[in-house]
Amino acid sequence: MDTNPETTFVRRKFTITEELDAELKQMADNNYQGNVSLCLRQSISDHRETLNGNGDLTIRHLIESVAHIEDQIDDLTESVNSFKQQTHPSDGSLSEAEGTGVSLEDAADPAAKQVISVLQKANTPLRVADIIEYVEMQPIDVRQILGYLIDHGHVFTTSGSPPRYYLAKISPSLNDNKNRHRGEYL
């Protein structure tokens, strides 16, 4: 609030409800020694900060939003853990050797067949961009298909950025050719 002694004051006429007038007088009595004008000026200044993204009200809204997001994350985590336990009750994960093999005949979706075919023909794990070069699909579609195949244990990823994708029971190592020689393409 501006407390400069050279500040010019303007007299305003306005109308408020009786309830707001009573509340204004009470706030002025409790906080501003009964000075209603000072109470209004300070209220306007505080509200300006709130509208500009500053102030306690904005912080409270942000805290509530963060708490809501944390609750959603907790709910999603519980859902994922519950789903993992339902689909794999023993230890919850598949190793590369235990992955469920998939063949072109197993895939009902033609787009999934294209992705599987590309992965079967590959000598090394592939990036999404590599797969997209061989199929006529949007990146989002390829990622969704890969997500489905990963969820069902047909495809695994390598660590690293960007991740590379390979079919189950196929070693991601470039130096490990024994799996390829044994014909473990699925």
Image (cartoon, helix red, strand yellow):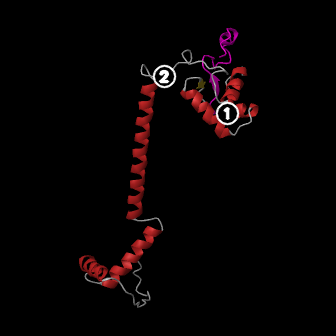
Above or below for 173 versus 23: above
Q: Which residue is depicted at the point 46% across and 25% down?
A: 87
- Classify residue 109 as left or right of residue 94: right
Task: Identify the image quadrant of residue 54.
Answer: bottom left
Identify the magenta region.
162-186
Q: CA distance from mark 2 to mark 1?
A: 23 Å
Name which of mark 2 and mark 1 comes first in the sequence. Answer: 2
Query: Counting other residues with Cα less than 10 Å from the Cα at mark 1, is it few (<14), some (14-19), or many (20 or more)?
Result: some
- List x then y, in percent, for residue 48: 44, 73
Above or below for 79 versus 183: below
Kind of residue at badge 1: Val
Q: Which residue is mark 1?
A: 128
Above or below for 101 versus 74: above
In what element is the residue under mark 1? helix
Kind of residue at badge 2: Ser
The stretch drawn in magenta includes residue 177: yes
Task: Identify the image quadrant of residue 46.
Answer: bottom left
Please name whichever residue, 103 or 167, is drawn nearer the observer in this view of the structure: 103
Query: Counting other residues with Cα less than 10 Å from the Cα at mark 2, is it few (<14), some (14-19), or many (20 or more)?
Result: some
Q: Main secondary structure of the magenta part?
A: loop
Task: Identify the image quadrant of residue 113.
Answer: top right
Question: Is residue 134 at least partly visible in the picture?
Answer: yes
Q: Which residue is mark 2?
A: 93
